[in-house]
Structures are given as structure tokens and as C-alpha cells.
């Protein structure tokens, strides 16, 4: 994948060989969890860059921001929230 972190389109970051992980943006909080972007894709937002979704993530620590990062491998079968939630 080329381009700066957070600039890749959402749809380019999901597939059989890659998935998204949401990470809390609050200093000192290290929560991270796999992120299923299905709701955003259904809303027609798949062409937006990952950075556009930072305010659509919520953490149990109280943070209202997060960042999405692309990771290698398929989406994990165990879908625990990890304390981060997608906010439409």
C-alpha cells in the first residue's frame, strides 16, 4: 500500500489478506481491537481515507477519537470489542 498513513481508502484496506484494527487515540490508553467497517461500506463511505473515520470510533476510556490501521491477515474470527466501538 502506498501513501501516507491514514490516507488509503477504506475499501483498499480490507480483504482476505488484510483487515482493520482500531486503536484508541487517547495518550496512555493502549486499547486496540479489530474493526469491522461493514456499516461504513453500506453507507457508501468506502472511498474515504482511513483518517476520515477517526471521530467515528469510541473507547471505553472515554476517548471519542481513534485511528484505523491496516494489518496483515484475515479478519479475526473472535470478534471481541476490545473496548473500542464503531460509531456511525
Image: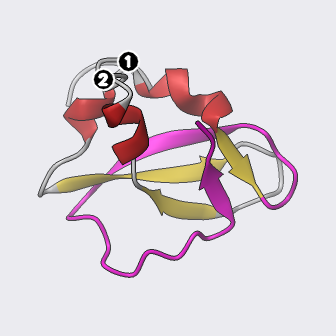
Q: Quadrant of the C terminus?
A: top right
From this view, report whether residue 7 is shown above or below residue 85: above
Identify the mark nearer the N-term, 2 or 1.
Answer: 2
Left or right: where does residue 78 sit relative to residue 47?
right
Of helix, strand and loop, which one carries label 1? loop
Residue at the right extreme, as displayed: 62
Q: Disc 2 marks which residue?
A: 9
Pick the front one: 58 or 39: 39
Q: Quadrant of the N terminus?
A: top left
Label of residue 48 in the image: 1
Left or right: where does residue 64 sit relative to residue 43?
right
Q: How many marks?
A: 2
- Asked if residue 17 is among those painted magenta in the image, a careful observer would answer no
Of helix, strand and loop, which one carries label 2? loop
Tell me residue 85's x, y (percent). 63, 55
Tell me residue 71's x, y (percent). 32, 54
Q: Residue at x 83, y 56 (%)?
A: 28
Tell me residue 38's x, y (percent). 35, 46
Q: Using the rendered image of the protein, determine whether residue 75 is visible from the camera's viewpoint.
A: yes
**Quadrant of res 66:** top right
Q: Using the rendered image of the protein, determine whether residue 5 is visible from the camera's viewpoint.
A: no
* Stretch in magenta: 60-88
Neighbour tally class for label 1: few under 14, some 14-19, many 20 plus, Cα within 10 Å: some
Label 2 and label 1: CA atoms lie apart by 5 Å
Pick the front one: 11 or 30: 11
Residues at badges 2 and 1 in contact (C-beta under 8 Å)? yes
Dominant secondary structure, magenta: loop
From this view, report whether residue 66 is shown above or below residue 71: above
Tell me residue 16's x, y (percent). 12, 57
Amino acid at each position: 500500500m502506498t501513501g501516507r498513513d491514514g490516507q488509503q481508502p477504506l475499501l483498499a484496506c480490507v480483504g482476505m489478506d488484510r483487515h482493520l484494527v482500531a486503536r484508541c487515540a487517547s495518550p496512555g490508553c493502549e486499547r486496540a481491537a479489530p474493526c469491522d467497517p461493514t456499516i461504513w461500506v453500506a453507507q457508501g463511505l468506502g472511498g474515504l481515507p482511513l483518517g476520515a473515520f477517526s471521530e467515528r470510533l469510541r473507547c471505553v476510556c472515554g476517548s471519542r477519537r481513534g485511528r484505523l490501521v491496516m494489518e496483515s491477515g484475515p479478519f479475526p474470527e473472535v470478534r471481541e470489542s476490545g473496548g473500542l466501538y464503531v460509531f456511525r
